[in-house]
């Protein structure tokens, strides 16, 4: 209903339509001017009453410089306007709407000729050519370069994602295994090296016991898994016993006692400066080696049992790890595919958008999207009003209003407004069928001018211009065809307005679409060319 309201409102102005009133006249102080010169346009109304003079806002190639206050004379009112022109040619001061006693009347149009100024090139030398003024850069100028940048970034992102997937799931990096000597073999090698040093034979008993106990401590630390080098003798024995119980290693109490005796003898040598005899030192050496042998046998049995017990768990864990790894791999590949599809879609949309902006003259609407009704089998002949105006169209143009406004019931008998609006394709088609009271039927030109005025009064309408041509139907019914263009919110649009009249009947078809859409313009022109009016 909101889109129908403007078409109903402009009908209300028909209530005051009549022939041009002889009491209203217009005049020019001159009909010929040169570029930039001024002329005076005067509207005179006989009698003194309620008169509404126009503002002369739209004059085509002519321009309004100023307007004076209305002058009151004894028998008339006059209002003068100062006009000028900067384009050479013949131009009309169009009909102006004057309200007299709350009724609208139209003045006559007047012809004005604007001549160029002759220049004597012999006396007046021509000025030098001015350099070309470079236009400032705007965002659209960078779009072709930005499309290439986004394309390059998209390719780099795809390469990075592919490298990540390959490195994580397909490239197996195998580090060389570190060679490690078993703890028992290492301990035996160190004992042999200690014997070769002959430390106690050279009165270095303390150093000898330090290395001897360190060999035993290191072995126990590696095999049992406890901190032995930092622990004292009093701390080490409880730690070993606790590990033996918790891990169920099976170390015999005799071995623990031998270790405790060896460490105590070493403590006496290291801290109490005890000098043991040679046979005591050799005995401690044998105790250490025998302790290592006993512990090795027990620990090897414990390791074998642990390996057998954990093989099943390890196998299950490995299977779960493989399944989990495969699941992660599938998810990563899925994410990669989604990212690839998203990037490809964005690049495709951006590239096509840039291509459309660079080739705006070739833009058209996809028949499978905005204008699906372009299929040949959907074209039908539709009828509007009575007597009907017929027109072939690929879409239904529904009735928007058939109610005569209360204010216009004294002027209009019937009203029929049919409207189709495709916002996606920016296309509008409006068919208007009017039946006036025979005594007050306006001229067709007045109806068309009112429609144009209602279009120009809409918000953000700029650069409105049009041209008029006669129109004749096959049944010899004559009318008028107006075609023009305007800009609205930065979008260039074209319109076609065709009207016919017969007695008190008026038929009018208005089409509006984007100027850049050749497909839509062809569609609308085909519809207009099929118009017919069935009159008996």
Image: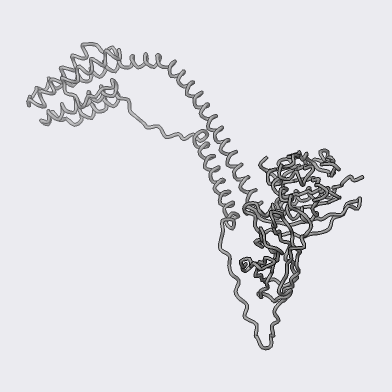
Q: Nearer the viewer, residue 63 or 504?
A: 504
Colour scheme in use: one colour
- Please indicate whether residue 35 sits to the left or right of residue 145 in the image: right
The residue at the point 12 percent across, 31 percent down is 202
Percent across and percent down for residue 525 are 80, 50
How far across and how far down the image is residue 116, in percent? 71, 77
Q: Is residue 510 above or below residue 73?
A: above
Q: Is residue 61 visible?
A: no
How many marks do you count on the picture? 0
Residue 391 position in % (x across, y down)? 83, 44
Q: In terms of image quadrants, where is residue 396?
A: top right
Horizontally, is 5 left or right of 441 in the view? left
Q: Give the vertical position of 474 relative to 313 (above or below).
A: below
Does 369 sit above or below residue 497? Answer: above
Point out the image quarter for the N terminus: top right
Question: Which picture quadrant has residue 247?
Answer: top left
- Residue 148 can be seen in this image: yes
Q: Is 9 above or below relative to 85?
A: above
Residue 409 in picture, x, y percent from top left: 75, 43
Left or right, 307 with reference to 129: left
Q: Residue at x 11, y 27 (%)?
A: 270
Quadrant of the rendering where the C terminus is positioned: top right
Residue lying at 71% horizontally and 44% vertically, measured from the top left: 407
Outermost residue, front side: 74
Q: Quadrant of residue 290?
A: top left
């Amino acid at each position: 209903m909101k889109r129908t309201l403007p078409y109903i409102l402009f009908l209300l102005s028909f209530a005051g339509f009549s022939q041009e009133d002889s009491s209203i006249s217009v005049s020019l102080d001159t009909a010929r001017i040169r570029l930039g010169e001024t002329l005076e346009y005067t509207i005179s109304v006989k009698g003194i009453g309620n008169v509404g003079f126009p503002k002369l806002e739209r004059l085509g190639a002519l321009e309004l410089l100023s307007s004076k206050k209305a002058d009151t004379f004894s028998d008339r009112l006059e209002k003068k306007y100062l006009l000028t022109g900067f384009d050479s040619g013949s131009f009309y001061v169009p009909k102006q709407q004057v309200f007299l006693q709350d009724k609208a009347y139209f003045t006559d149009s007047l012809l004005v000729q604007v001549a160029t100024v002759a220049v004597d090139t012999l006396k007046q030398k021509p000025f030098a050519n001015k350099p070309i003024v470079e236009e400032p850069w705007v965002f659209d100028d960078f779009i072709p370069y930005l499309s290439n940048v986004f394309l390059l970034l998209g390719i780099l992102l795809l390469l990075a994602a592919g490298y990540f997937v390959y490195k994580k799931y397909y490239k197996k990096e195998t580090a060389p295994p570190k060679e490690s000597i078993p703890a028992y073999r290492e301990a035996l090698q160190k004992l042999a090296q200690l014997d070769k040093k002959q430390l106690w034979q050279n009165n270095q008993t303390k150093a000898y016991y330090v290395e001897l106990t360190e060999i035993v401590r290191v072995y126990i630390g590696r095999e049992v898994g406890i901190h032995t080098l930092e622990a004292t003798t009093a701390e080490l024995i409880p730690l070993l016993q606790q590990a033996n119980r918790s891990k169920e290693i099976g170390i015999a109490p005799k071995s623990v006692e031998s270790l405790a005796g060896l460490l105590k003898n070493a403590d006496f040598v290291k801290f109490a400066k005890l000098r043991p005899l040679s046979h005591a030192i050799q005995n401690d050496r044998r105790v250490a080696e025998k302790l290592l042998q006993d512990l090795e046998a027990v620990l090897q049995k414990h390791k074998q049992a642990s390996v057998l017990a954990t093989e099943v768990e390890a196998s299950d864990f490995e299977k779960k790890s493989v399944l989990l790894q495969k699941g992660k791999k599938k998810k990563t590949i899925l994410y990669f595919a989604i990212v690839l599809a998203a990037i490809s879609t964005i690049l495709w949309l951006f590239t096509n958008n840039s291509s459309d902006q660079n080739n705006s003259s070739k833009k058209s609407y996809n028949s499978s999207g905005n204008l699906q009704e372009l299929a040949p089998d959907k074209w039908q002949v539709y009828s509007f009003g009575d007597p009907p105006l017929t027109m072939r169209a690929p879409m239904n143009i529904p009735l928007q209003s058939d109610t005569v406004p209360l204010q216009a019931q004294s002027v209009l008998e019937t009203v029929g407004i049919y409207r189709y609006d495709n916002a996606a394709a920016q296309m509008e088609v409006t068919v208007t069928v009017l039946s006036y009271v025979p005594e007050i039927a306006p001229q067709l030109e007045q109806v068309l001018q009112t429609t144009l005025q209602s279009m120009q009064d809409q918000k953000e309408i700029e650069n409105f211009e049009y041209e008029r041509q006669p129109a004749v139907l096959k049944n010899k019914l004559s009318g008028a065809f107006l075609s023009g263009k305007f800009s609205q919110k930065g979008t260039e649009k074209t319109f076609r307005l065709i009207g016919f009249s017969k007695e008190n009947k008026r038929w009018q078809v208005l089409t509006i679409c984007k100027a850049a859409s050749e497909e839509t313009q062809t569609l609308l022109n085909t519809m207009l060319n099929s118009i017919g009016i069935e009159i008996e």
